[in-house]
Image (spheres, helix red, strand yellow):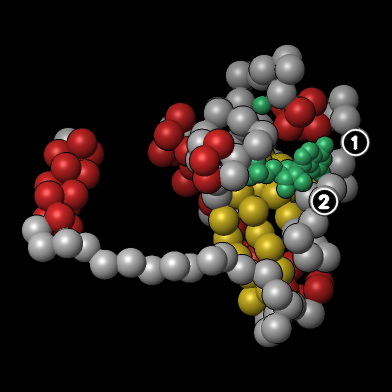
Amino acid sequence: MGRKDDCIFCKIIAGDIPSLRVWDSPVGVAFLDVNPLAEGHTLLVPRQHFADLRDMPPDTLGQLLAVAPALCAAIIAATGATGVNFLQNTGASSGQVVLHTHFHFIPRRDGDGLGYRWNAGNYSEGRAEVLQGAIAEALG
Ligand code: 5GP
Ligand code: ZN
């Protein structure tokens, strides 16, 4: 099973670094983020080391994410939050710091002050169609 010796999440999964786990299964674990954006902020992590979302085998990803609905509901029930941001960072420019794929579950409440700078833009004439073609072609 893939483990990377200098990876902090591989160490957490192996039990070499303690964590407060809320879910433990053959495919992955979920534990409280040590520096939460809100109380109950939880990370869902595959047992095997994959650097980011691009490296995840679809079957493994599907098995891991099967717990996402229940985990989301449990976090809401336990914290009294009224919403959750389900977030995955791939690449340093997205904010990814730990290079072992993980999914954030961040409890949200009205007026909590968290959130993105959601500076929505517009496409110039024809640009969206160019990108549509490029992404579809890259998908193959
Ligand atoms: P990223 O920015 O890579 O998407 O998120 C990494 C997350 O891992 C951060 O929210 C950070 O607080 C959390 N984290 C980093 N090291 C540890 C640790 O040793 N234990 C726990 N529980 N969380 C960690
Ligand atoms: Zn790892």
Residue 6 rendering spot, x and y as whole percentages: 73, 17
Q: Earlier in the sequence, mark 1 or mark 2?
A: 1
Residue 59 rendering spot, x and y as whole percentages: 44, 38
Residue 110 rendering spot, x and y as whole percentages: 68, 84
Q: Are marks 1 and 2 in contact (CB under 8 Å)?
A: no
For label 1, being within 8 Å of ligand 1 is answered no
Residue 26 rendering spot, x and y as whole percentages: 66, 36
Mark 2, other Cα within 10 Å: few <14 / some 14–19 / many ≥20: few
Report which quarter residue 5 is drawn in. top right
Q: Is residue 112 above or below residue 68?
A: below
- Residue under label 2, please give it: 35
- Residue at 62% x, 19% y: name it: 1
Which quarter shows the C terminus?
A: top left
- Residue at 68% x, 69% y: name it: 114
Residue lying farthest to the right in this orientation: 18
60 left or right of 123?
A: right
Mark 1, other Cα within 10 Å: few <14 / some 14–19 / many ≥20: few
Q: Nearer the viewer, residue 11 or 64?
A: 11
10 left or right of 104?
A: right
For label 2, being within 8 Å of ligand 1 is answered yes
Considering the numbered disc 2 on the image, is that residue within a helix, a strand or a loop?
loop
Residue lying farthest to the front in this orientation: 124
- Residue under label 1, please give it: 18
- Residue at 55% x, 49% y: name it: 88
